[in-house]
C-alpha cells in the first residue's frame, strides 16, 4: 500500500489499517475526525486579482505552426494558486507603535484581557480611557482607527493625536501612582524592592567581588614583573639604584582601581 498520499486521506488509510489488522487499536483522534471530516478542495482556485495576468498569458502566440495552449513552468511562477497574504491596517499601526516604544512590550498582560466579553469593537473609542480595558498600545491602535473613520483625519494625523493622548494619560497614571505610594509610606507602609532594584543589587555584588579579585591579580602581576626585573638586573656590572630612587618609583607605581 502506498502511504505517500495526501493528509486528507489519513482517515481512509487508518480505516484500512484497522480492517486489515495492521493497527490493533483506534487512535484517540479517529472518532472525532470521522464525525467531523476535514473539507477537501477538489480543484484549485485562482484568485480574482490574478485573472488579468492569466488572460494575457492565455492569448495564443503564433510560433511557426504552433500555438500556446497552456501555461509553462515559467508562467506558474506568478503565484496564481498560492493563498493571498492578509494585510490589516491595525497590524501596521501596532508595528509602528511598538518599534517607537519597545519598553511597552514589557508591560504585563492579564489573561482576562483575552476574554470575549472585553471586545475592542464594543468600546467607546471617542475617548482614550476605557473603564474595562487597561491603557496600552492597543488603545492607541483603536483610537487611531476611530479618528480616521469619524474625524476624517489621515493616518499620520490620527496616529499622532492618539499617541499624544496616550502620553497624557500615561503621565497622569504615573503621577497618581507616585502620590499614592508617598501617602502609603507616610502612614507606615513598606514596599519591597522592585525587580530592577534587585537586579542592580546583584550586579553591585558581582562588581565588588570582581574589584577584589582584580586587585589581587594586579598585585600578583606586579610581583612577577618585579621578580623578572630583579633577575635581569642582578648582574655584577650593573649598579644597584639608590634607596631614594626606589622609594620614588614605588610612589609612582601605585595600583589603580579597575574602572567599572
Image (tube, rainbow, N blue to C red):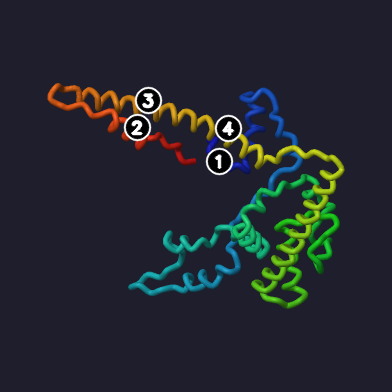
Would you name the residue on which mark 4 appears? 205
Would you name the residue on which mark 3 appears? 220
Left or right of 118? Residue 44 is left
Q: Closer to the N terminus: mark 1 or mark 4?
A: 1
Give above or below for 212 relative to 66: above
Kindly report which numbered mark, 3 or 2, lies closer to the viewer in this rendering: 2
Q: Are marks 3 and 2 in contact (CB under 8 Å)?
A: no
Would you name the residue on which mark 1 appears? 5
Residue shown at the point (17%, 27%) measured from the top left = 239
Left or right of 29? Residue 69 is left
Q: Closer to the N terminus: mark 3 or mark 4?
A: 4
Name the residue furthest bottom: 152
Q: Which mark is residue 237?
A: none
Kindly report which numbered mark, 2 or 4, lies closer to the viewer in this rendering: 2
Q: Closer to the N terminus: mark 3 or mark 2?
A: 3
Q: How dense is the environment of label 3, judged by Cα within 10 Å: few (below 14), some, or many (20 and up)?
A: few
Q: Closer to the N terminus: mark 3 or mark 1?
A: 1
Left or right of 42? Residue 34 is right
Give above or below for 16 relative to 131: above
Q: Secondary structure at mark 2?
A: helix
Q: Closer to the N terminus: mark 2 or mark 4?
A: 4
Quadrant position of residue 163 = bottom right
Q: Which mark is residue 250?
A: 2
Kindly report which numbered mark, 1 or 2, lies closer to the viewer in this rendering: 2
Quadrant position of residue 12 = top right
Horizontal and vertical percent for residue 210? 49, 31
Q: Are marks 3 and 1 in contact (CB under 8 Å)?
A: no
Q: Nearer the viewer, residue 123 or 232?
A: 232
Horizontal and vertical percent for residue 257? 45, 37
Amino acid at each position: 500500500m502506498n502511504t505517500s498520499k495526501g493528509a486528507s486521506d489519513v482517515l481512509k488509510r487508518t480505516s484500512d489499517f484497522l480492517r486489515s489488522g495492521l493497527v490493533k487499536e483506534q487512535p484517540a483522534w479517529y472518532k472525532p475526525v470521522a464525525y467531523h471530516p476535514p473539507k477537501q478542495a477538489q480543484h484549485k482556485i485562482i484568485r480574482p486579482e490574478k485573472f488579468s495576468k492569466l488572460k494575457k498569458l492565455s492569448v495564443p502566440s503564433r510560433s511557426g505552426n504552433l500555438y500556446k495552449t497552456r501555461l509553462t513552468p515559467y508562467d506558474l511562477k506568478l503565484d496564481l494558486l498560492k493563498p493571498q497574504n492578509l494585510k490589516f491596517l491595525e497590524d501596521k499601526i501596532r508595528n509602528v507603535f511598538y518599534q517607537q516604544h519597545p519598553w511597552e512590550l514589557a508591560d504585563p498582560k492579564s489573561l482576562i484581557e483575552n476574554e470575549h466579553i472585553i471586545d475592542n469593537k464594543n468600546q467607546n473609542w471617542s475617548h482614550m480611557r476605557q473603564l474595562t480595558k487597561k491603557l496600552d498600545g492597543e488603545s492607541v491602535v483603536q483610537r487611531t482607527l476611530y479618528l480616521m473613520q469619524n474625524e476624517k483625519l489621515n493616518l499620520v494625523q490620527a496616529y499622532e493625536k492618539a499617541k499624544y493622548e496616550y502620553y497624557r494619560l500615561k503621565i497622569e497614571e504615573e503621577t497618581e501612582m507616585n502620590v499614592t505610594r508617598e501617602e502609603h509610606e507616610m502612614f507606615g507602609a513598606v514596599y519591597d524592592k522592585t525587580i530592577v532594584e534587585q537586579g542592580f543589587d546583584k550586579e553591585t555584588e558581582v562588581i565588588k567581588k570582581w574589584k577584589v579579585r582584580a586587585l589581587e591579580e594586579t598585585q600578583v602581576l606586579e610581583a612577577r614583573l618585579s621578580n623578572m626585573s630583579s633577575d635581569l638586573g642582578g648582574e655584577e656590572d650593573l649598579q644597584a639604584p639608590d634607596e631614594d630612587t626606589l622609594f620614588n618609583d614605588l610612589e609612582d607605581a601605585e595600583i589603580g582601581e579597575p574602572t567599572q
